[in-house]
Image: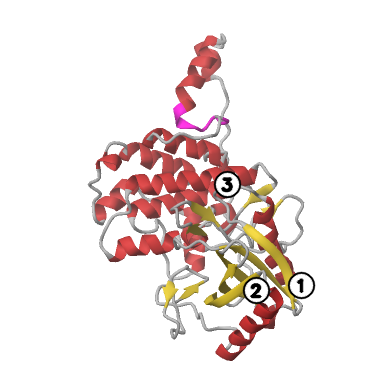
Amino acid sequence: MIRCFNCGFENPDHIKFCGHCGNNIQASTGQGKQEADLEMLNQFLFPKFILEKKIGKGGMATVYLGEQTALQRKIVVKILNADISGDEEIRERFLLEARTPARLKHPNIVEVIDVGMCEDRPFYIMEYASGGSLSEKLKEYRDQGMQFPFKDAVNTIIKILEALEYCHVNDLQSHRDIKPANIMFRATGEPIIVDFGIAKIADSSITRTRMTMGTANYMSPEQCQGRKDIDGRSDVYSVGIMLFELLAGELPFKGDSGLSIMIKQVKEKLPSLNQRIKGRVERTDSDYLKVADKIEKVIETACAKSRKKRYQTAKEFAMDLSALVGTKLNMTPTGHHSLQNTWGLVFAFLFLGLGIGGFLGYKVILEKPKVNIIIDT
C-alpha cells in the first residue's frame, strides 16, 4: 500500500491518483528509480538499518519502511526526491521538518532517530507509527456510516493540544499544518504529531515573505490572509476545526478550491456544530448529549475569527475539554479565556475591592482586523 502525502489515505501500489483526494501519487519518480533509491539507501545505512519497501511517496519525498537492526524495531526513512534536491530552500525546509521534532522531546511528537545525507540528498529516520493516521480513522467511520466516538475524539485532541503547548513554549511559534493526515497513531493507540515542514520557529528566516502556507481546510484566518505574525493561536484554530470535523463527520467550510475555502475561513461564521450533526447522522452517545451545548461553545471559542477572542494557548483549550470528559491534565491554568476559570475571575475582582462599578469599567478591546486575502502563486 502507498500512503498519499496530501491526505494520508492508503492506496494500492498500482494506483496513480489517490482514491480519496485525487493527488498524483506517482509523480516525481518512476518505479525503476525508486528501486534504485531503495538499493542506494540500503547500501548507505547497512548494517544499522535495513529497508524493506516503499510505503509512501509524493512530489517532495519518498518514504521507506525498514528496521533498526540492533533494537529490532520498525522505522521509516524519508528522503528528498532527486529532482528537487538541488533547491536550497526545499532542502532547508526538509531538514527543518526533521530537526524540529528531534529537539522537541514529547510523548505525542514523532521521534526522529537520525538525519543525514546520501548522494547529496537529505534524509531522516523516524519511528514507524503502525496505527495509521487520524484521517484514515475518520474515513473508516464515515465509510461505515458510524460516528467517531465522542470521548475518543476529545481525548485524542487533548493529547495533541498537550504536545502543541509543549511546542509553543519551546520556541516553535506555530506548527501551521495541523490536520488529521499529520496526526499518526502508535501501535498503542497514542497519537503523535508529524510533519513539521512548514513550522514557524522563533528567529527562523526560511519562510518567504507573504507566502501563504498550510492546508486550506484547517488554516486560521490569519494564515489565509498571509500574515507574518503567526503564533500558537493559529494552531488552536486548526485543532478546533479538526475537532469539529471529528464530531460532525464533515468539515465546517467547503468549497470548490483552496481559495474559496480560505475566503470562508476569513469571512464566514463557524456553522453550529449541533445543527450540523443533526443534519447528518445524529449522535446518540450519552457522553456527547450530556455536554452538547458546552462542546459547541468550546469549539466556537477555539475557532473565533479574532485571535484575541480565541483560547490564547493550547493549554486553555485542553483544560476546557478535559473538564467536559473528566480527563486529568499535567498542565496548570494560565489564561483568562478558559471557561472553567471565568467565574473564579469574576469573584476575584469583586473580592479585591474593585466593586461592581470597577468591574463593569474593565475595558475589553476586541480585535477587528481588515479582511485582506493574500494568495501568492
Tell whether 117 sits left or right of 331: right
1 or 2: tag closer to the N-terminus: 2
Dot 2 crowding, Cα within 10 Å, few <14, some 14–19, many 20+: many
Asked if 347 appears above or below 154 in the picture, the reply is above
C-alpha separation, residue under disc 1 versus residue under disc 2: 15 Å
Instruction: Say whether residue 72 is visible.
Output: yes
Report the coloring of the rendering.
secondary structure
Residue lying at 73% horizontally and 49% vertically, measured from the top left: 202
Tag 1 and tag 2, C-beta contact below 8 Å: no
Asked if 79 appears above or below 240 in the picture, the reply is below
Q: How many marks?
A: 3
Q: Which residue is mark 3?
A: 164
> Which residue range is magenta in the image?
334-340
Asked if 278 appears above or below 80 in the picture, the reply is above
Does dot 1 land on a helix, a strand or a loop? helix
Q: Which mark is residue 16?
A: none
Residue 328: percent from the left, percent from the top?
A: 45, 34
C-alpha separation, residue under disc 3 versus residue under disc 1: 28 Å
Q: Which residue is mark 2?
A: 79
Residue in the foreground of this view, choosing between 89 and 52: 52
Does dot 2 land on a helix, a strand or a loop? strand
Residue lying at 39% horizontally and 58% vertically, measured from the top left: 251
Amino acid type, callout 3: Leu
Amino acid type, callout 1: Glu
Q: Which residue is mark 1?
A: 88
2 or 3: tag closer to the N-terminus: 2
Residue lying at 70% horizontally and 59% vertically, measured from the top left: 99
Residue 355: percent from the left, percent from the top?
A: 52, 10
